[in-house]
Amino acid sequence: MRHDDSGAPRSGDRTAAPRRGSVGLGALAAVLVVAAGLSLAVGARALSPAEVWHGLFAAPDADQRLTEIRLIMRTVRVPRTVLAVVAGLALGVGGALIQGYTRNPIADTGLVGVNAGA
């Protein structure tokens, strides 16, 4: 960021805020990918990252062990992870809508009476 002689930022330098937002968004996306990977690996039977990869992308074959891993991944863990991401997105959008509607950046559901209806 460029500064004038007094040490204050110049008014024409507007590149720092969008760059900081992009870095933050990228970091949050990376955290989401790591959390989704952990969600796919953790369960009643822990799977290694290689087993998760094979369960998602490997072609069906005669190996019984890989067939069981594919079944676990596609019927239990992938739907669980997708549902968790969609629910988190819905909660985030709902909170942003309430804050936008009330024009209050710290608004919550109690402010508009949602808690009373629950």
Image: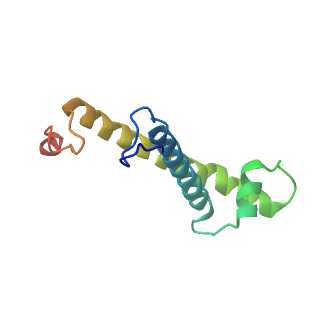
- Out of 16 and 54, give the one closest to the viewer: 16
User: Which quarter shows the C terminus?
Assistant: top left
Position of 14 relative to 45 (above/below): above
The residue located at (25%, 36%) in the rendering is 98
Left or right for 63, reference 114: right
Colour approach in the figure:
rainbow
- Out of 24 and 65, give the one closest to the viewer: 24
Position of 69 relative to 92 (above/below): below
Percent position of residue 47, x then y? 67, 66
Question: Residue extending furthest front?
Answer: 5
Question: Residue extending furthest right?
Answer: 62
The residue located at (18%, 40%) in the rendering is 114
- Out of 6 and 44, give the one closest to the viewer: 6
The residue located at (38%, 49%) in the rendering is 7
Numbered-mark total: 0
Residue 14, by quadrant, is: top left
The residue located at (77%, 56%) in the rendering is 54
Left or right for 6, reference 43: left
Percent position of residue 62, x then y? 87, 56
Percent position of residue 78, x then y? 60, 50
Left or right for 78, reference 7: right
